[in-house]
Image: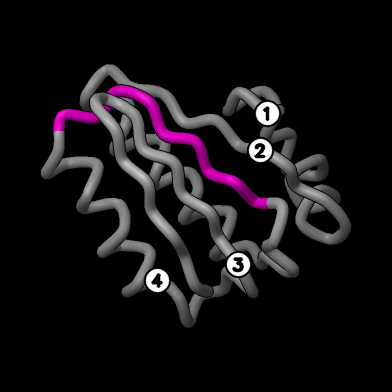
Amino acid sequence: MNYKVNAAGEEIHVELTGRLTFADYGSFKELTELFVEHELKNCLLNLSNLEFIDSAGLGMLLIARDKMRMKDGDVTLKGAQGQVKKMLDLGHFDSLFKVV
């Protein structure tokens, strides 16, 4: 997994690319530490260039949501397609996140 971050004010936009799997846990944890370090209230995770996600990757999205909720913030998932969209649908992530 690779990611690009654009933070402005209380919002952070993160574009995830490649594959989000168990092997990416360390990198994803570093990313979510940004949520804690900065005064962020909203996080947009752009998944449009994410090619694959496994169950560990789904768990990492939940970790991101939990970290934002600790700060009374929200996570929005955007642009999921293909296998990633199927996994989000199977996990009923639309009931856990705002999905656009």
Relative to 35, is 54 on the left or the right?
Answer: right
Q: Amino acid at mark 3?
A: Thr
Residue at horizontal 50%, vertical 75%?
A: 22
Q: Tell me which label, 2 or 3, sits earlier in the chain.
A: 3
Q: Position of residue 36 (x, y in %)?
A: 17, 41
**Residue most toward the bottom?**
23
Q: For marks 2 and 4, give the one nearer the viewer.
A: 2
Nearest to viewer (mark 2 / mark 1): 2
Q: Is residue 92 rendered to the left or right of residue 71?
A: right
Quarter where residue 37 is shown: top left
Q: CA distance from mark 4 to mark 1?
A: 22 Å
Q: Is residue 32 above or below residue 54?
A: above
Residue on which disc 3 sits: 17
Residue type at mark 2: give it: Lys
**Nearer mark to the viewer, of 4 and 1:** 1
Q: Residues within 10 Å of mark 2 (few under 14, many from 20)?
A: some
Residue that badge 1 annotates: 99
Mark 2 and mark 4 in contact? Answer it, CB < 8 Å: no
Q: Which mark is residue 6?
A: none
Nearer the N terminus, badge 2 or badge 1?
A: 2
Spatial distance from mark 3 to mark 1, Cα to Cα? Answer: 18 Å
Q: Nearer the viewer, mark 3 or mark 1?
A: 3
Mark 2 → mark 1, Cα distance in angstroms: 6 Å
- Range drawn in magenta: 39-47
The total of numbered circles placed on residues is 4
> Closer to the N terminus: mark 2 or mark 4?
4
Q: Any mark on residue 25, and which?
A: 4
Q: Badge 4: few (under 14), some or many (20 or more) residues near its Cα, within 10 Å?
A: some
**Pointer 3 and pointer 4: residues touching (CB < 8 Å)?**
no
Q: CA distance from mark 2 to mark 3?
A: 13 Å
Disc 3: CA contacts within 10 A as few (<14), some (14-19) or many (>=20): some
Q: Viewer-proximal residue, 82 or 67?
A: 82
